[in-house]
Amino acid sequence: MKCLILAAGYATRLYPLTENFPKPLLKVGEKTILDWLLDDVDSADLVDGYVVISNHKFAHHFEDWAKESRLPVTVVDDGTDTNETRLGAVRDIQFAVEKLGLDDDLLVLAGDNVLDFSLTRFMEYAEKKGTSCVMRYWEPDEKRLTKSGVAEIGQDDLLLSLEEKPAQPKSHWCTPPFYFYKKEDAAKIAEAIADGCGTDAPGSLVAWMAKHGTIHSMEMPGRRYDIGNLESYEQVQKEYRGIVK
C-alpha cells in the first residue's frame, strides 16, 4: 500500500503563516502536522511508501523535510505556483499516480488535519471490508453541511452517494478527507475525470466511485482538527493532546 498526502494547496486563509511556507509543515505541539499523520500511519506497518504531492512553490520545503524523515518519502511537484493555477486534489492524485507509475492500494490523506485517534483503525476496517472505504462523522450544523462532502449511508455502512457542498444536504453525515482506494479503483481516476468528475475537492472522486462501484463508510471514532484558518490553528495548538491508540 502507498500513502498519498495531498499537500498542494496554498492555504491563503492562514496568511501570513503560509504565505511562503506549507501548512502541513506547521508545528502542532512538538511535531509538524505531517509528522503526526505519518508517524501514526507507519505504526500499522502496512504502508511501504509515502508520496507528498506539493505545488512548485512549496516543493523545496517538503524536500528538505523528507531528507530528515526516517520514512521512505517521495515528493512530487505538480508544477503549479499560484492558487489560481492549482490542479485540484483529484488531478493531483492522478498526476502522482501517473508520474510514479503507482499500481497499489492507496491511502489518500489531506495533509492539513490532525486526529485524536489512530488511522490504523480505518486501515483495519478497510482490510476487513475488502473494498474502497471512507470515513464519516455526524455534523448537526446545517451551515457546515453546505460546505462539506455530505454522504448518504445504507445498510452495513454502504456509501450510497456523496455530494460536495450541497445546497440541500441529504443527511448529516460528512466525509472527511481520508480515503482508502483499492488498486482497481485507483486505476479508474483518469476514467472518472474524463466522465466529468469534479477535480477540485477530493470527495468528488469518491462521489463518482460510489456510482460505479462499492465503497463503505466507517464512522469516525474520534475527533478531527481541520486547520483552515488562523483561529482554528490557534485552537488546535491549545487543545491537541496527541493520538489515543
Image (tube, helix red, strand yellow):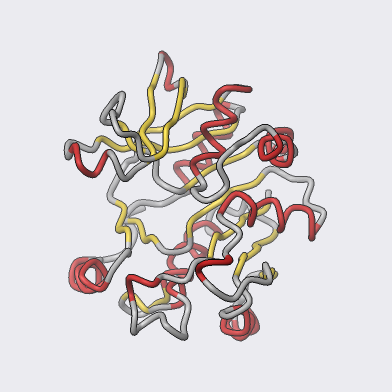
Residue furthest to the right in view is 101
> Which quarter of the picture shows residue 8?
bottom right
Write the residue at 55% across / 29% down. Answer: 128
Q: Name above or below for residue 102 compared with residue 174.
A: below
In this rendering, position of residue 109 left or right of residue 74 = left
Q: Nearer the viewer, residue 48 or 58?
A: 58
Q: Residue at x 32, y 64 (%)?
A: 227
Q: Would residue 237 be found to the left or right of residue 99 on screen?
A: left
Which residue sits at x=73%, y=33%? 184
Q: Is residue 87 above or below residue 160?
A: below
Residue 51 occupies quadrant:
bottom right
Residue 121 coordinates in the image, percent (x, y) = 44, 42
**Relative to the observer, which residue lies in front, 9 or 1?**
9
Report the number of numbered marks.
0
Residue at the far top: name it: 155
| Residue 212 falls left or right of residue 238 | right
Q: Position of residue 35 (x, y in %)?
A: 48, 71
Which sits in the foreground, 20 or 232? Answer: 20
Q: Position of residue 123 (x, y in %)?
A: 53, 42
Q: In the image, is residue 40 above or below residue 120?
A: below
Q: Position of residue 243 (x, y in %)?
A: 34, 59
Q: Residue furthest front?
A: 84
Residue in the image at 61% along x and 59% along y:
87
